[in-house]
Amino acid sequence: MSRVDPEASLQPLAYRLRWRPHGVVPGAHPGHGEGTEGEFRRHVSLLRHPDPRRLDLRASLRDPFGELHVRQFAPRRAVPVAALVDLSGSMRFGGAVAGRVADLCALLAVSAQRAGDPFALFGADAHLREEACLPFTRRRGQEEEVRRRLAGVRPTGGRAVEGLIEAAERLPMRRALVFLISDFHMPAPEIARLLDALWRHDVVPVVVEDGLLDAALPRWGLVEVADLETGAVRLVVMRPALRERWRREANARRQAREKLFAERGLRPFALTDPLDTEALARRLMEG
């Protein structure tokens, strides 16, 4: 199992798209349409595609009707890649944003740069946090700026749905690859509204998980509970029945979230602590 070392140079990961991007900017991904360069697609008649430079003599000689054939290619194009990061209060738990979320976004930035794709970062709570945003760029070394910005930002109270929808409005009109990074501790209707705002894009939900939330609950005892969204703190007498109820409710929220993803054909990635790059590489190559 491979883990990210913040002191080591990041090794870019390859990623596969389930669709062919439009556009004119050359890149690494098989694009939409026809061209004279890129990935070989098929042979077509010279009459249909009159470009003698692409004439394939071997395929033409094999044709029993003596028709001339030319090679046709799928052009390779660049695709915008963006990370939308939830900076609401619940994301303060365990220092997730400055740790594994920053690691993930830095890795996505260097991977996009290696593929020739522009990368952008948008961090938001109730509004966009400009200090946690970077515009689309192919600039080398951007991964360090991404890591620095996320390490220096403090998640605050308030739900991030409105800010993340605002971030969605800054995405390009053409289809982009979007990593939506959140613990998704929000009501199901708000999650649905956020996903619907990203309808035109290829969205990878990244669920920030922490097993301590369940594993650390004792069967009996006094537990200090803090609401990271509002800042309210109270003392709770934990007992087996209450612990079981909390777990049932957490599982119900998880199932509702998974149902929303499945209805939209989205396959989430679980962001554990620390980031498991091997699991991420497998997920990215699934498309």
Image (cartoon, helix red, strand yellow):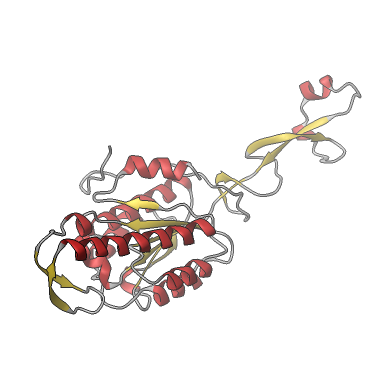
Instruction: Name which residue lies at 27% across and 60% down.
Output: 247
Image location (x, y in percent) of residue 155:
26, 71
Residue at 48% over, 49% down: 116
Q: Is residue 79 left or right of residue 179?
A: right
Q: Position of residue 194 (x, y in %)?
A: 47, 70
Across and down, in percent, residue 183 comes to: 33, 62
Which of the two residues, 284 or 134, is positioned nearer the viewer here? 284
* Residue drawn at (43%, 50%) of the image: 112
- Image check: 106 left or right of 98? right
Numbered circles on residues, count: 0
Q: Is residue 141 visible?
A: no
Residue reaching furthest right? 65
Quarter containing the N terminus: top left
Which residue is outermost to the front?
A: 241
Q: Residue at x 65, y 40 (%)?
A: 37
Q: From the viewer's perspective, is residue 78 above or below residue 192? A: above
Where 225 falls versus 287 (above or below)?
below
Task: Using the rendered image of the protein, determine whether residue 94 is visible from the camera's viewpoint.
Answer: yes
| Left or right: where 223 falls relative to 71 | left
* Residue 230 place in picture, x, y as percent: 24, 79
The residue nearer to you, when weighing 272 against 168, is: 272
Q: Is residue 109 above or below residue 161?
A: above
